Amino acid sequence: MARNILIIGGNSGIGLATVKRLQAQGDQLTIASRSHDQLTPLGLTAQSYDAVSETPLTLPDSLDGVVYFPGTINFKPFHRLTKDDFQTDLQINLMGAINVLQQALPALKKSPSASVVLFSTIAVKCGMPLHASIAVAKGALEGLTRSLAAEWAPKIRVNAIAPALTDTKLTAALLSDEKRRQAAADRHPLKTVGTADENAELVEFLLSDASRFTTGQIHRTDGGLSSLRLF
């Protein structure tokens, strides 16, 4: 039976890879994104959604899953970060997700078994220079993940994915030539950077009944970077 899945931000990167996977397996997708140009060739339409303005959504009566993809990359030393920088990262990464989930909750409650997938970052677990603002925002999101997983059990599962550097449009400047790409890969024990499709595969799993005993978890797709040291 086709599931109703809400995708926020499915026009590029991990979001687009996820959309393609879910479309291929016959799910009914409600997509909301700031831009739609990559979705049109797939025969899909999308509502406009801006995490900053917390756009109201048009939702189906029942939802079996929600995935929230919007994120930011704002690498600055702490002394150069302004309150507006912190506020913008919090608004897009945390408050935008809260807005979506509050709108979606009545529809999620009507599903016999619903799943929510959010996105964090490796920088929450591993202290990294220049990541203060995004680590603050995503750290709060991880707290939200665990809190909602407890509050919404047993019918609604809530998990998060915390990738390391992933090869997407958002990180293109960091992987712009072979020297930079190799340097980035060498920082990971598995000597590679992540791909959008690898993360999309995990999203697909977390939305499925195969993960029915998994909730409140932060899944780290980071090539071992957050937990391994090779000597």
Image (spheres, rainbow, N blue to C red):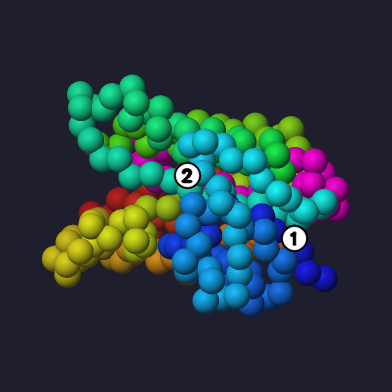
Q: Which amino acid type corresponds to the residue marked 2 in the rendered image?
A: Ser
Image quarter hosting the C terminus: bottom left
Which picture quadrant has residue 205? Answer: bottom right
Q: Residues within 10 Å of mark 2 (few under 14, many from 20)?
A: many
Q: Determine if residue 141 is in view.
A: no
Residue 121 in the image: x percent, y percent? 42, 45
Horizontal arrangement in the rendering, residue 42 relative to residue 151 (left or right): left
Q: Determine if residue 16 is in view.
A: yes
Q: In terms of sequence position, does the residue under pointer 2 or pointer 1 come before the other? A: 1
Between the residue at mark 2 and the residue at mark 1, the CA separation in whole angstroms equals 24 Å
Relative depth, front residue between 65 and 52: 52
Horizontal arrangement in the rendering, residue 12 relative to residue 59 (left or right): left
Q: Residues within 10 Å of mark 1 (few under 14, many from 20)?
A: many
Q: Residue at x 34, y 26 (%)?
A: 84
Q: Residue at x 67, y 63 (%)?
A: 29
User: Is residue 112 highlighted in magenta?
Assistant: yes
Closer to viewer: mark 2 or mark 1: 1
Question: Which SS class for mark 2?
Answer: loop
Question: Which SS class for mark 1?
Answer: strand
Q: Which amino acid type corresponds to the residue marked 1 in the rendered image?
A: Asn
Q: Are marks 2 and 1 in contact (CB under 8 Å)?
A: no
Residue 201 in the image: x percent, y percent? 55, 67
* 130 in relation to 37, above or below: above
User: Is residue 176 highlighted in magenta?
Assistant: no
* 83 in relation to 66, above or below: above
Q: Which residues are magenta?
A: 105-129
Horizontal arrangement in the rendering, residue 202 relative to residue 198 (left or right): right
Q: Residue at x 33, y 30 (%)?
A: 85
* Numbered label attached to residue 4: 1
Residue lying farthest to the left in this orientation: 179
Which picture quadrant has residue 131? Answer: top left
Instruction: Quickly name the residue at label 2.
Output: 120
